[in-house]
Amino acid sequence: MSSTTLPVRTYEVRTYGCQMNAHDSERIAGLLEQSGYVPAAEGTLADLVVYNTCAVRDNADQRLYGNVGQLASRKPENPGMQIAVGGCLAQKDQRAILTKAPWVDVVFGTHNLGSLPSLLERARHTGESQAELLDELAAFPSSLPTKRESTFGAWVSISVGCNNTCTFCIVPSLRGKEKDRRPGEILSEITGLVQQGVIEVTLLGQNVNAYGVEFGDRQAFAKLLRACGDIEGLERVRFTSPHPKDFTDDVIAAMAETPNVMPQLHMPLQSGSDRVLAEMRRSYRADRFLGILENVRAAMPHAAITTDIIVGFPGETEADFEQTLEVVRRARFSGAFTFQYSPRPGTPAGSREDQVPAEVVTDRYNRLVALQNDIAWQENRKLEGTVVEVLIAEHEGKKDHDTERLSGRHLDNRLVHVARPSTPVRPGDLVTARVTYGAPYHLIADDVIGVRATRAGDAADARRHTATGVGLGMPAIRQDL
């Protein structure tokens, strides 16, 4: 009796959007590899291309359909090739994706990642496109297998969904109401990750500091941060993204008093105008936001604070925009993600008639970016001569190759390029160095003081030595933020 060996199918996941999407892509990769797929080698076309999409910006739609369209002509040349579209845009457009792009084989939503392998199999056997989009989360996605690209760091979801009703945001309708994991389940996952060599975790939630609302504990997030401090071997804890309305003093105290919680905060401002904040349904005002920053810096003087800002919200006047600039001047952010407002169908702001002209939005955006870049540069120059501890990252870019530097993150999450030490350094190892130059977007630290080998570096060595199969050493997930 003879047996036939089925050909190995390769895959690639292309990711757009936030850290939550990136973490979902790790789960997608884990599911696919559990089902027998292997990563495609760099520079080759995979048998399966999965788009994990974002729907926050209007150009997300354009990018998806443009990219998927480019693959349409490749399918006839590659028999058996499949294209799958998931994530927030899939949850929004649903079966309309198959009308706009009939060459797509599978559409799946934010609530049913686990269905992807069976949908792909069904599409192969029937020769017909498949779509499955649930309205509610069937099971918390943490139960799914995960393939992490990093050996030293991991995202850990503590909640999914959002109970806020910001008038510009489509996320609650795509991710659903907030659902919280129990603390013991989260801490158990983190402990398991640490045993695998992870030394840094980032706690994820659409509104991370509202954690506990589902089981009625308003101090649950602060308690969770403190509990992370009791996990032996866990060196760095971060979280994103908190909402100012839920940012309480007990969280600030937990951050300051828990040694492995990093002196870093990313908290969205969105606008510095109280009038615009009210129309956005952001339940805080500029003074409240600045007060939180003052309290954080009082507890952690060296904390780096970053933010999100939207320019050109409907009805925004020049006076409103000037108020945003004033808050930015006072806040002294070390960095900011700045966005030109993009109307999203189905949101209250998207149907307003007082949309700001595009040329006005662009002008304000450029002025904001120029101001923030100048502030960030000033703040980075203040760090010249100070000592930083850099957790070396997995992949080096072309710049690192050309300058013979290594790159990673300081405790406060600033990007640092360090001179290559004479001692061998692996991803996940820690380099201590003195800052020699503060640039607008990063620090240069060419005065190396020391290197500390870590368990994460050991794990990176083990992965490199045991990696086998198609696509050896090549990433399976591409993130196009």
Image (spheres, grey):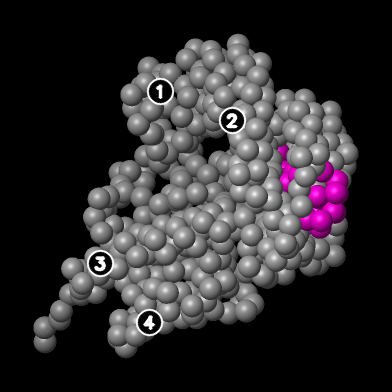
The quarter of the picture where residue 387 lies is top right
Quarter placement of the N terminus: bottom left
Name the front one of labels 3 and 2.
Answer: 3
The quarter of the picture where residue 158 lies is bottom right
- Label number found at residue 414: 2
Tell me whether the residue at label 1 lies in contact with that at label 4, contact meaning CB atoms closer than 8 angstroms: no
Name the front one of labels 1 and 4.
Answer: 4
Judged left or right of residue 3, residue 455 is right
Q: Cα distance, mark 1 to mark 4?
A: 47 Å
Q: Compared with residue 39, is residue 388 higher up or lower down, i.e. above or below?
A: above
**Quick one: SS at disc 2?**
loop
**Quick one: SS at disc 3?**
loop
Q: Check disc 4: other Cα within 10 Å, few if <14, some if 14-19, many if 20+.
A: many
N-terminal-most mark, 4 or 2: 4
Tell me whether the residue at label 4 lies in contact with that at label 2, contact meaning CB atoms closer than 8 angstroms: no
Question: Could you tell me the amino acid type at mark 3?
Answer: Ser
Residue picked out by circle 4: 129
Q: Cα distance, mark 4 to mark 2?
A: 44 Å
N-terminal-most mark, 2 or 1: 1
Residue picked out by circle 1: 405
- Res 423 seen here: no
N-terminal-most mark, 3 or 2: 3
N-terminal-most mark, 4 or 3: 3
- Label number found at residue 73: 3
**Quick one: SS at disc 4?**
loop
Tell me whether the residue at label 4 lies in contact with that at label 3, contact meaning CB atoms closer than 8 angstroms: no
